Amino acid sequence: MKKDTFGINMKKYCRSHEDIMASALSNNEVTEELIETHSEKIKIVQHERLVHLIVTFLVAILVFFLMYLALIHPELGILPLILSLVALILVGFYLYHYFFLENTLQRWYVMLDKAKEML
């Protein structure tokens, strides 16, 4: 088994589970255990989404603070501008990942509803 050095790959984790759910729904192989597992995975991804939302807001606040420093205290030079640019790029990546998690959860909610209807 390959060791994940930097944690799990969330996209691969979500796609793998989504493929299992889609297969079970299309083949009418829904069980209580599958619904339970799906609900647990929803909770895991909801937690991940919340953490990313909080971190995104904190990094965005950092961007505004660094821009404030750059505008109000020009004696600091270009360093606050460079740091704010780096933090802004980081916010972009966090937003991208947050929207991936949000869209995944919305698809999973629909899958959960379909699975419950089938059962």
Image (cartoon, grey):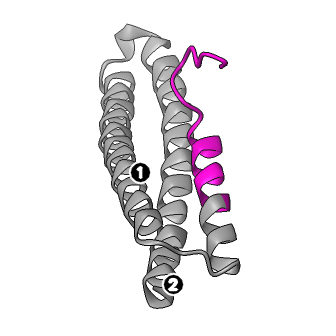
The reply to whether the magenta stretch includes residue 15 is: yes
Quadrant containing the N terminus is top right
- Compared across the picture, whether 37 is left or right of 62 comes to right
Query: Which residue is rendered at x = 32% and y = 48% of the image?
Result: 47
- Compared across the picture, whether 19 is left or right of 101 comes to right
105 up-or-down from 49: above or below: below
Q: Name the residue under label 2.
A: 114
Query: Which residue is rendered at x = 48% and y = 22% of the image?
Result: 81
Residue 119 horizontal/vertical position (percent): 45, 85
Residue 7 horizontal/vertical position (percent): 51, 24
**Which label sits on residue 77?**
none
- Compared across the picture, whether 46 is left or right of 4 comes to left
Secondary element at image label 2: helix
Read off the magenta span.
1-19
**Which label sits on residue 45?**
1
Assess disc 1: are there few (<14), some (14-19) or many (≥20) residues with their C-alpha within 10 Å of its C-alpha. Answer: some
Residue 9 horizontal/vertical position (percent): 59, 34
Secondary element at image label 1: helix
Picture quadrant where residue 70 is located: top left
Residue at the outermost bottom position: 117
The reply to whether the magenta stretch includes residue 102 is: no
- Give the number of marks: 2
Residue 51 horizontal/vertical position (percent): 32, 41
